[in-house]
Image (cartoon, rainbow, N blue to C red):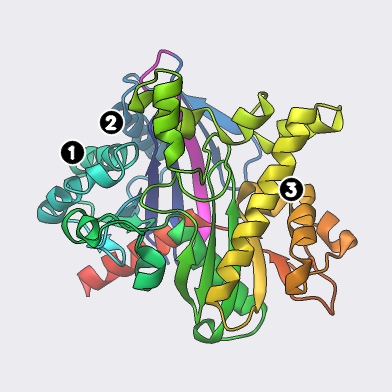
Amino acid sequence: MNHKNILVLNCGSSSLKFAVITPHNQQVLIQGLAERLNTAQASIHYQIANHSEKKSAQPNDTSHQGAIEAVLDVLKQHGLLANLNGVGHRVVHGGEAYSESLLLNPENITSLEKLHHLAPLHNPVNLLGIKAITTLLPRLPQVAVFDTAFHQTLPETAYLYGVPLELYQEHGVRRYGFHGTSYRYVSKKAAQLIHKPLQDSHFLIAHLGNGCSACAIKNGQSVDTSMGLTPLEGLLMGTRSGDVDPGLIDFLCERLNLKLADVMAMLNKKSGLLGISGISNDMRETQLAAQQGDSRANLAVEIFAFRVARYLGALAVSLPSIDALIFTGGIGENDRLTRSLVLEHLAILGFELDGKLNQENGNATGRISHADSTLAMVVATDEELMIAMDTHALVAGLKE
């Protein structure tokens, strides 16, 4: 039987991640990355399933549309274009309007443009991918999968800020949360691993990568999370500061004679691990420098872990009990030291690390804690698969 495939696109400011996935068996047929877009160094690197060799291609046009054209050429060369059944797009911000994935049409694409102000660094480039596919493959159904949608179950007590309520009522100022697609996938997977219905499961999840957040999941639903109106709030990240005193912004503007845009650029792009270590936004490089005796790098590693633990401790108050603490994302899945430091801080919640299991990134079910400890585990996320499955479901519904 010839099963139809889904193309998954994730457009960043200067990059484009792509994959073709068969929803029937969840097989990834090709995945790749177009990077350094809008520069002379733009390039595409990809890997075909069951081939160890990585291949490259050069887009003739270095724009996002040019990169997508080049990706479609690659798919055509490898016989993957004709069998596409739909395209799923990661869209960072869906505001309050969208609590689930959306089958796109001209009207709701226009409505998505009205959300640009909520994520000006992300949503406009996400929309570039949608518009490029509309131009290049106009008959192919498209689906938007929102980072924020999973968190639309947050109660008012968790999503409202301590500012005049009119700011929420008139301008949508509230906590939205991000990484929702990852949390949705990981919570489903974790419930399967602990043999418990998702609707009865209570999890703390730390999604740790270059961007980092944490989430409390009660009865399978998000009830609190660390990121806020924007992805700047919350944990220390690769280049983002996470939580700071709001008074810091005015202080820096006056003290250093900086413009607001300069301070926001500092908080978004020059802070976090990079800002504290002075070396790198990459945890691996930061830890290597710390091991070699760099005190700033060591401080960055310790602050990062403490912030994660502090947020997880705070999120725990939203849960009646903890079925598991789950680490995911590039750092969460692979960084043994960070997991060890975080769990050390969380002994008060009953966590005790099993050093051997932690070295192995978890046993067969992902467990890294002692048998008599509160369960801590590692679960690899798969946002692309989640996007593909959502797209498949909505496109299948269209054709019923």
Residues at marks 2 and 1, CA–CA distance in whole angstroms: 9 Å
**Residue at image location 85% in from the left, 33% down from the top:** 291
Q: Pointers 2 and 1 in contact (CB under 8 A)?
A: yes
Foreground of the two, 177 or 143: 177
Q: Amino acid at mark 2?
A: Gln
Q: Nearer the viewer, mark 3 or mark 2?
A: 3
Q: Position of residue 386 (x, y in %)?
A: 45, 61
Give the label on residue 65, or none: 2
Residue to which mark 3 is pinned: 335
Provide the residue designation for mark 1.
135
**SS at mark 3?**
loop
- Give percent across and percent down for residue 316: 59, 71
Query: Disc 1 to disc 3, how far (Cα)?
Result: 42 Å
Q: Earlier in the sequence, mark 3 or mark 2?
A: 2
> Left or right of 239: which side holds 379?
right
Q: Which residue is drawn at the image coordinates 78% and 63% (left, top)?
A: 362
Magenta segment boundaries in residue numbering:
25-40
> Residue 125's spot in the image, x, y percent?
30, 37
Task: Say if 155 sits above or below 247 in the image.
Answer: below
